[in-house]
Image (cartoon, helix red, strand yellow):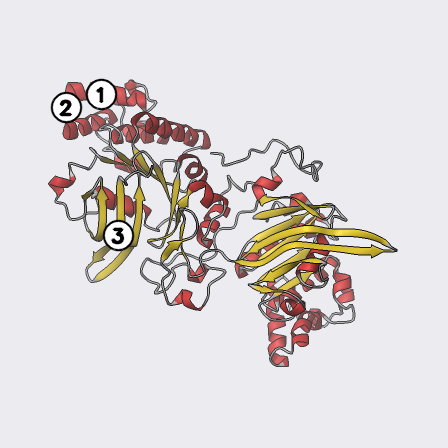
């Protein structure tokens, strides 16, 4: 049975004015929350999360607010202060962030909690003091701490006092704003336990505002993603975390160290715009899949699956390459050897996908099928919505490129560095000779190679293995690919050169935003950069999923890399 919303917000806009300057903060925000349920509100600092909480509480005094905020059927916007006080703290309560700044430093914390009871419930001071002692116990604090001042408490203890104050009047809705900020992991976990226990005991609905994605995963049923004051994604928590629709939500999840503790962390490229400063999609300048409409027209929030919504002109993160049912058999002296069997693989815009497996498992053959260097016996490859039947996608700008395992075989040793990097453009006949030279020269710093004339004129056979591999990557980058397939490109390098190349490649992908299929037999390398992973064994894909799921799996049936896989890692969404 669907519950009627306890809180319903429609087209909420909030802006501040300073003299003649208008500062928009929230832009047509809509969301709803049922009784007893928990909604997670996520987004970078400055996206409007706290302003939304203040608007619901009626505490955004100096702001101009339009739109609807309905609580239990009552419209709150436009109510006079006296009417708002019937809801504030009695029916709707807020646990503020920055606990040190909230308390009066010259009054004990117990007196401040008691004052809430006296003012909103009309209790006398003696009864309020007794009730405060009970609230302290509920919040996990000994009553003796009632006599302490805020500066005498730890951050976690102050947070518990704020929670005691917020639940003092048994509200129907509790808004908790960044309750885990500045807490150590143990204290944050204990704080989450406390909030969950209180919600189970008191039955209030909750809006949890937090950067702590594991806490969001553990404590909420639904998520709303705010960006530049706008809702850009909404849906069930587990579905959104497992398969985000919006590139921004994916970026937030990928930057979470608790989910991807083994990965090098890369924040979302660029910075958020000020709310209202962009006429089109506010995420467009940072998006890896933006199109012509994105910079001029704001995308509406539309359905994107069961109970899911996304604000994206392309309907969410799109697929750059999809392979279905690929099979390839080779005839070796009359013996049929099945190199790839019923392989399905999907790569989305802007993600790094790992293809891992032991030597001889079919990884390179699968790569060759994806770029049409080999024709599959069965199955098909779709690149950017078009079935791939030849090598057109690798011989054009903005297509896909394959970087081979052995750079000595991939690049003619007789070519100079400049000629080797420019060669793909020469083959395409792209623009003029001068344009091609400039494009090749621009690619060299991307891979940390010199543009010195002496280096440019060196023949490729005079380069080290690491330099040759960087030249191979530069050759691929001159075509501005949307998909780069890197086939065992670190296999022939020493550990130091491997580390440099891998970090350079990931940095390049992060900066340019292209998708990448990283092929390797080394699970320790791939876990450093992979968002998702496929495991290939004897031509078959035997495991797939998010990187943290595949690389940390302890399923005994998944023994392809059991000698490489470390033990003892946690799974799921820890806090």
How far apart are the alpha carbons under marks 2 and 3?
A: 36 Å
Any mark on residue 469, and which? none
188 left or right of 130?
right
Q: Nearer the viewer, mark 3 or mark 1?
A: 3
Marks 2,1: beta carbons within 8 A: yes
**What residue is shown with label 2?**
123
- In the depicted structure, whether residue 86 falls above or below residue 135: below
Q: Which mark is residue 131?
A: 1
Task: Name the front one of labels 2 and 3.
Answer: 3
In the image, which disc is placed on residue 12? Answer: 3
Image location of residue 472, percent across then percent down? 69, 63
Query: In which image quadrant can residue 329 be found?
Result: bottom right
Question: What is the CA distance from the residue labelled 2 to the residue labelled 1?
Answer: 9 Å
Judging depth in this view, the residue of 416 and 49 nearest the camera is: 49
For mark 3, give the secondary structure. Answer: strand
Whether residue 30 can be seen here:
yes
Residue 35 vs residue 462, the one in the foreground: 35
Residue 534 on image: x %, y %: 63, 47
Horizontally, residue 82 falls left or right of residue 205, namely: left
For the residue labelled by badge 2, is the local secondary structure a helix, a strand or a loop? loop
Local packing at callout 3 (Cα closer than 10 Å; few below 14, some 14-19, many 20+) is: many
Q: Earlier in the sequence, mark 2 or mark 1?
A: 2
The furthest residue to the right: 333
Place of residue 443 in the rendered image (x, y in percent of width and height, measured from the top left): 61, 67
């Amino acid at each position: 049975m669907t519950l009627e919303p306890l809180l319903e917000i429609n087209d909420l806009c909030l802006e501040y004015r300073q003299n003649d300057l208008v500062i928009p903060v929230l832009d047509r925000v809509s969301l709803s929350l049922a009784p007893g349920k928990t909604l997670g509100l996520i987004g970078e600092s400055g996206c409007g999360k706290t302003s939304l909480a203040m608007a619901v509480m009626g505490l955004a005094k100096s702001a101009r607010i339009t739109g609807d905020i309905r609580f239990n059927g009552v419209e709150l916007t436009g109510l006079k202060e006296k009417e708002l006080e019937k809801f504030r703290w009695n029916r709707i309560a807020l646990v503020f962030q920055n606990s040190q700044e909230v308390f009066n430093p010259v009054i004990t914390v117990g007196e401040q909690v008691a004052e809430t009871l006296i003012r909103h419930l009309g209790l006398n001071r003696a009864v309020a003091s007794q009730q405060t002692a009970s609230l302290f116990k509920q919040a996990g604090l000994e009553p003796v701490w009632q006599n302490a001042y805020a500066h005498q408490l730890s951050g976690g203890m102050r947070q518990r006092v704020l929670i005691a104050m917020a639940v003092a009047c048994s509200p129907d809705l509790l808004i908790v704003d960044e309750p885990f900020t500045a807490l150590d992991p143990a204290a944050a976990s204990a704080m989450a336990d406390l909030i969950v226990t209180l919600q189970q005991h008191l039955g209030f609905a909750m809006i949890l505002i937090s950067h702590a994605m594991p806490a969001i995963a553990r404590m909420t049923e639904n998520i709303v993603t705010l960006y530049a004051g706008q809702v850009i994604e909404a849906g069930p928590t587990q579905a959104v975390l497992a398969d985000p629709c919006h590139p921004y939500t994916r970026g937030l999840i990928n930057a979470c160290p608790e989910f991807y503790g083994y990965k090098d962390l890369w924040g979302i490229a660029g910075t958020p715009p000020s709310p209202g400063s962009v006429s089109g999609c506010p995420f467009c300048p940072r998006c890896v899949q933006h199109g012509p409409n994105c910079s001029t027209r704001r995308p509406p929030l539309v359905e994107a699956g069961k109970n899911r919504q996304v604000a994206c002109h392309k309907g969410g993160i799109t697929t750059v390459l999809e392979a279905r049912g690929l099979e390839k058999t080779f005839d070796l002296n009359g013996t049929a050897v099945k190199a790839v069997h019923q392989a399905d693989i999907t790569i989305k815009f802007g993600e790094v996908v790992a293809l891992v497996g032991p030597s001889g498992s079919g990884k390179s053959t699968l790569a060759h099928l994806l770029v049409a260097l080999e024709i599959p016996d069965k199955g098909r490859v779709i690149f950017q919505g078009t079935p791939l039947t030849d090598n057109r996608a690798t011989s054009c700008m903005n297509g896909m490129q394959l970087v081979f395992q052995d750079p000595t075989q991939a690049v003619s040793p007789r070519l100079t560095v400049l000629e080797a990097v420019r060669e793909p453009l020469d083959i395409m006949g792209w623009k003029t000779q001068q344009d091609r030279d400039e494009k090749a020269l621009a690619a060299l710093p991307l891979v940390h190679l010199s543009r010195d004339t002496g280096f440019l004129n060196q023949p490729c056979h005079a380069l080290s293995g690491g330099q040759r591999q960087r030249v191979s990557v530069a050759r691929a980058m001159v075509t501005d690919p949307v998909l780069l397939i890197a086939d065992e490109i670190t296999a022939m390098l020493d550990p130091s050169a491997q580390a440099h190349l891998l970090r350079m490649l990931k940095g390049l992908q992060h900066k340019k935003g292209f998708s990448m299929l990283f092929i390797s037999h080394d699970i320790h390398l791939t876990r450093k950069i992979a968002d998702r992973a496929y495991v290939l064994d004897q031509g078959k894909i035997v495991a797939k999923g998010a990187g943290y799921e595949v690389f940390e799996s302890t399923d005994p049936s998944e023994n392809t890399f059991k000698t490489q896989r470390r033990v003892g890692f946690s799974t799921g969404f820890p806090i």
